[in-house]
Every structure is written in C-alpha cells, then in structure tokens.
Amino acid sequence: MSMKEQIKVALTGNPNSGKTTLFNAITGRIEQVGNWAGVTIEKKEGDIKKGLNKTNVQVTAVDLPGAYSMSPFTSEESITSGFVRNENPDVIINIVDSTNLSRSLFFTTQLLELEIPVVVALNKIDLSKKKATNIDVDSLSKLLGCPVVETVSTKGNNNGLEDLISTVVEVTGKTQTAPFDIKGVNMADQKSVEASDKKRYEFVKEIVSKVEERKVISSKQTKQDAVDRVLAHKWLGIPIFALVMWAVFSISQAHLGPLLADTFVGWIDSFYAWVEGSLGDGVSPVLSSILLDGIIGGVGAVVGFLPLIMVLFFLLALLEDCGYMARVAVVMDRFFKKVGLSGKSIIPMIVGIGCSIPGVMSTRTIKNERQRRTTAMLTPFMPCGAKLPVIALFAGVFFNDAAWMGVTMYFVGIAIIILGALLVVRITGEKNARSFFIMELPEYRFPSIKRAAVSMLSRGKAFIIKAGTIILLCNAAVHIMQTFNWQFQAVAEGAENTSILASMASPFAIILVPLGFGAWQLAAAAITGFIAKENVVGTLAVVYGITNFIDTEELALVSGSADVAQIMGLTSVAALAYLMFNLFTPPCFAAIGAMNSEMENKKWLWGGIAFQFGMGYVVAFMTYQIGTMITTGALGSGFIPGLVAVALMIGYVVYLVRKGDEVAKRKVALSS
Amino acid sequence: MESIISNKGISRILSKTKGLGGPAMNLAQGRINTEYVIKEIKTNDEELKSFLFTLGCYEGELVTVISILAENYVISVKDARYSIDKDLAEAIIV
C-alpha cells in the first residue's frame, strides 16, 4: 500500500478501446463517447466515484486520446505521449481491447518502459468471450510483468472496475520490470529504433501465441463483413445513409419531437400565465413587458423546442454508438476525395448536427492540414442543434410543418459543403494533391439506450443552461432596445422604427433587401443569431410579439401559424430564403472560436468566415429571386443591386480559383 | 536510402515465403479472402509508413483483403479491420 493519499492515474490505450467509456464509468462523468477511433481529442480529468473506490486514497483519473504507440502520428496521439512523459502520473491504466491483443500489446510494452506502474485493463472481455476467444489472464500478467484486470466498461455492474481501482492503488509506488529489453537501442537513430520495434512486435506475437486461443480467425469473413457489404455498398451506401438521416430528422422534427413539444409548450404557457397573474397591476407595464414578453416569451420560444432537440440528440447518440459512423466515412470517402476532402470529414459533419463546436474540434483527427482546415470551415454548414428551432419555426409557420423541409435543409447543407470543398481545393492549388485514407472499422454493437439517454440529458441540460443565460440576456437586451429610443423614452405605438434596435438594425436590413427580407426586425434576429443561433427564434418572438403563437393545442406551431406568417410579412419564398440565410451564414461566435483554434491560421479563419457570409448571401439571393420568379413570374425586390453584389462575390471566387489552378499547374511542372 | 532498406526486406521475405512470392504486385491487385505477406510499404510519406507500422502493417506481416466497398478496400491486419483507399492499397506491395 502506498503512503500517498492522492494519486493521479492516466487512462491510455489504442483508439476505440473504450477509454472514455471506462472513464465515464469510474468517474460518473458524461464525456462524449462513440464507436469509432478518435472520439476523444483532449485530455479530461475526474475523480473516481466513491462507490468504486474502497480504499482511502483519492484517485483522480485523466482520460487521454487514443494512441497506437508512443511515437506520435496524429496530434491527439502526441497529447497522450506528452502527458505520460511530462506529467508523471502515479499509475497508468492501459486499456487493452481484448479482441485485438496482437496490436494493443505493442503500446503496452512501450508503456511498461516508462518506469511508472502499469495496470492493464483487459477491456471488451464480453466481446472476446462471445467470439470464444480464450485469454489466459494469469500468464499474460506474468509475461508482461504487470497486473491484468478483466473489464467490461459498458456494463453497469460486475464489470471489474472495482477490482481495477483497488489494483491501481495497490501498485502505486511499486516498481515493475519492463518485459521487453531495449538495451543497446539508440533512441536517436531511426534505424535502430525501427529494428527494435520490429523485435518488439515479434515479442508481442510470442506473448499472444502463449496466452490467446482463438476460435474465430480474424482474417476470415464474418457476419459483420456481410453487413458492411450492404451498408457500405458502392450504390446502396448513399441511399441507406440518406434514409437513416431522414429517419433521424423526421422522428425528431415531425413525429416524436413535436408530440413531446406540445406538452412542454403547454407548461411554458401556464408559467407565463402564472407570472402574469402574480405580477398583478401594481408593476410598471414596461417592466412587466420586459419580464413577460422579453424574458419568458423569448426564452420560452426557444426552450419550447427542447423536446425536438433532445430527441435528435438521443438518435444521434444511438447512431454514434453502433459503429455505423465509420462505415459512412467509407461510403463518403469516394465522393469527398473528388472534392479534395477525405471520408473522415463526414464525421465532424455528423457530430456537427448536434453542435458545430465539438464537430469542428473533431476535425483534429484529420492528418492533412488543408483537409482539416477545409473541414473545420465547412462543418458549420451542417445545421446544428441550435439551428433546429429556427428550422422548426419556419417549417411550422410557412410550410405546414412539412418534415421534408428539415431534411432538405440538411441535404442543402451537404451540397454546400461539397461545393465549398471543391472551391477550396481549387483555390489552394492542391487539386492534384494526393492523400491517403485509412480508417479502422470497429465492430458493430447494439447501441446502449442508457448511454444515449445520458448523452441526451447532458446535452439537454447544456441547452437549458444556455437558454437561461446567454439567450435570456439577449432577449432582455433586445426587448429593452426595442422598447426605448435613443433618448431612453419608451417608443410610442406606431413609431417602432425609432427604437434603438430598429435604428441599429436598419442599415443591415438594406443589404438584405435583395434577399427578400429587408425588415429591421429580421435583420436584428439574424444578428443576434451570431451570439447563439437559438436567438433567431427568441428575437423574432420578441420583436414581433408572436410568443403567444408558439403555443399549441395539437401540433407545435400549427395553430395560428397563418397569423405568424402574416405578422412577419414574408412570402413563403422569402421565408425560405431567410431560413437558408440563417442556416448557411457563419455559425455562432463560439463555433467561430473553435474554427480559429483548429485552423491555427488567421488567413484561413477570415477566408472561412468571408466564404460563409458569401455563401449565405448567394444562397438566399438565389432562393428568393428564382423562387419569386417561379411563383409570381416577376423578379423580387432589389434584384439589380443584389445581382451586382452576387456577381462580384462569384467573380472574386472565380479569380481565386484561376489563380489556384496556376499554382497547381506550376506544382505539376515542378514535379515532372 | 529508403529503397536500400526495403530491397533488403524484400529479398529476406521472398526467401521465407516460397510459393506466395512470385512477382511483386500491390494489394489493390490482390484477390479477396487470400492471405498475403507484405513485402514493402511503398511510399515517401514516412509518417504514414510509421503509422501503418504501429497498426502492424509492415513488411513480413500478413494482410487479407476482406472486401472491396465503394472503391475502398477492407483489409484485415492483426485482429482488426481497416478501410483503406485504392491509393493506399497500391502502396502496399505483396
């Protein structure tokens, strides 16, 4: 037993060996997990749960991104080796995927040379037992010279975790002897290290042959491979993916989501009525209006969409858990490669459906710099959870709650991403650049309902916190700015255009005339959207006082929807243009911050933001003008100035593409 | 320099794997469900090479093509499945 009262233990292991699942299980934290390699990109710390720790030593666990070896290849791997080398954890837990000993133990033998006690958690033992693989744990422990504990971190109890923690405490401060001899290896000499690493693999092979008995030979076809052949089929892959996504959106936005939202909005309404009742007549009308219409109304309009978002998060979590994502990357690789990206770019985009910030952050697993930056720049085009209320509001008010509206928006997002990638690869002059794609295909598993529920609740909580802070403040501010003019007098009825908000938003509104929505109210809502996209709904509710229309008897937004449309004074086409403008302009500031940190280059960042603005403007312009042409036979307002602006933007991009092509030509000339 | 190392590697392995050897071809030309011995990883990208090494994909090791999906190759190396693209499959000489 060690004398230390507080120890730090690092969780290390190959990607997708279950480190974060184990971390969540032993700390009670709710970090993002998923069934593919490279979910965790930053280290995370947490204290071990009291229930698991039967010792009087306080144990802090640090979850690290996965690594295949101590020699870093991707940046998240260098976080791991850097941490283990520099921060001196007291113990290392090496999570080993028991279904793949022959690869995992390579890293284990390296960890054993760091002079820090190692405990091997032989994880996914349920999966290897299912395959009738027999592992002699005692011999393995003897051969490695460190304790080995069988674990199933996905299971609630009887999972070996208590045993793991007590073993960790036991080995603290003890010394272990590294099993593999690296004497005589010159670490500075690459050849010497290479030769030694080959011997290391031989050594691992020997251990595996002694401790492992396999019934299922890995190189033989399995049922999983048969499933792969369907899900990642050349022609079926894309339709299946589209169908899966369509199911996700239609369940969350047209069926289950609105059904739950119904009840929920009822509660908000009762709350509104209750506050209104308890305020009575004694409170000044300005104050009560700020509280009722500004805060409760605005926040309520946003929170009303919470059920839709939670259902979406739940379904996405199931999708992330089952192993399908890696297959989607395979299916998309062929198409993404044509536009200079890799199949891996699809994962940030799918994560981005929940929230762009983790989506942009997960681009870190993309090795190629240009592909990584391009993906970080384009990921926000995938409508995120915060944009979902905006979509749902417009689908409800202008399109009779059509499910296809929402789904269409996501596929428009994908189309824009592909176009954007194509332009970026041309502009950077790298259209001839080659890059390799390699992705581990994890085994399929039945997604855990519990994990999906936990993930949904934690994301839902984050959403409520955001609504109660940023969105609440924004709505209060919008309401105050709308109520007063620059002399701080209450704006008279009929003179709404003199309010602070109106005068600030009007200059922007002029720019938006060619897009079909040149009203200051709509401009203000779009601007507050940069703080948080949910604000678009909140601000619209406040400025138009339409809070009361977002109540429902039957389905969210159906009742009185015609009136909402009337108050906003938009045609369906202009509404669609406005929706697209909000979806496909730059994301919220927080996501822009994430773009900044992943791109690590100011030129890329500003270029990306400009591109996003331009894209939003062009898409909205086209939608409005072409749509108006089709529906009314005439051009929409502000066509000529809008056309000039759009032509200038497109012209500039064409100029950049031409320049990039010349760079590419020079590269070809140089290399031949 | 690199080529010298890999040439050595080839001759060493060729002598070990009679019958399987034959003229060098890349994995993209390989047959499904056939186990091949890797002779060389042919790329100038040293990082990629060392990454493949950590996966256990290097000369002398076994690789099997499980299926060809959407122009990508599903391969089995050690006890894991990977999807690789054609360019990478062509870089793996068997």
Image (spheres, rainbow, N blue to C red):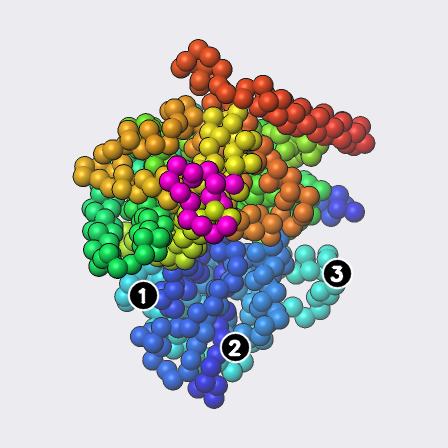
Which quarter shows the N terminus of chain A? bottom left
Residue picked out by circle 2: A90
Q: Nearer the viewer, residue A601 or B46?
A: A601
Whether tag 3 and tag 1 are in contact, CB under 8 A, the answer is: no
Q: Is residue A296 above or below residue A113?
A: above
Q: How far separated are the C-alphas under marks 2 and 3?
A: 30 Å
A199 relative to A328 in the view: left or right:
right
Determine the chain carrying the residue at label 3: A
The stretch in magenta equals A487-503
Residue picked out by circle 3: A189
Determine the chain carrying the residue at label 2: A
Instruction: Report the mark closest to the observer, 3 or 1.
Output: 1
Which residue is rendered at x = 63% and y = 27% of the image?
A649
* Residue lying furthest top: A633
Q: Position of residue A410 (x, y in %)?
A: 42, 33
Local crowd size for mark 2, using a 10 Å CA cut-off: few (<14), some (14–19), many (≥20): many
Mark 2 and mark 3, same subunit? yes
Q: Is residue A578 above or below residue A455?
A: above
The number of numbered badges drawn on the structure is 3
Local crowd size for mark 1, using a 10 Å CA cut-off: few (<14), some (14–19), many (≥20): many
| Magenta-colored stretch includes residue B74 | no
Q: How far separated are the C-alphas under marks 1 and 2?
A: 23 Å
The amino acid type, in three-letter code, at marker 1 is Asn
Residue picked out by circle 1: A159
Q: How far separated are the C-alphas under marks 3 and 1?
A: 43 Å
Helix, strand or loop under label 2: loop
Instruction: Report the mark closest to the observer, 2 or 3.
Output: 2
Q: Which mark is first along the chain, 1 or 3?
A: 1
Helix, strand or loop under label 1: loop
Q: Nearer the viewer, residue A388 or A636?
A: A636
Q: Which mark is residue B25?
A: none
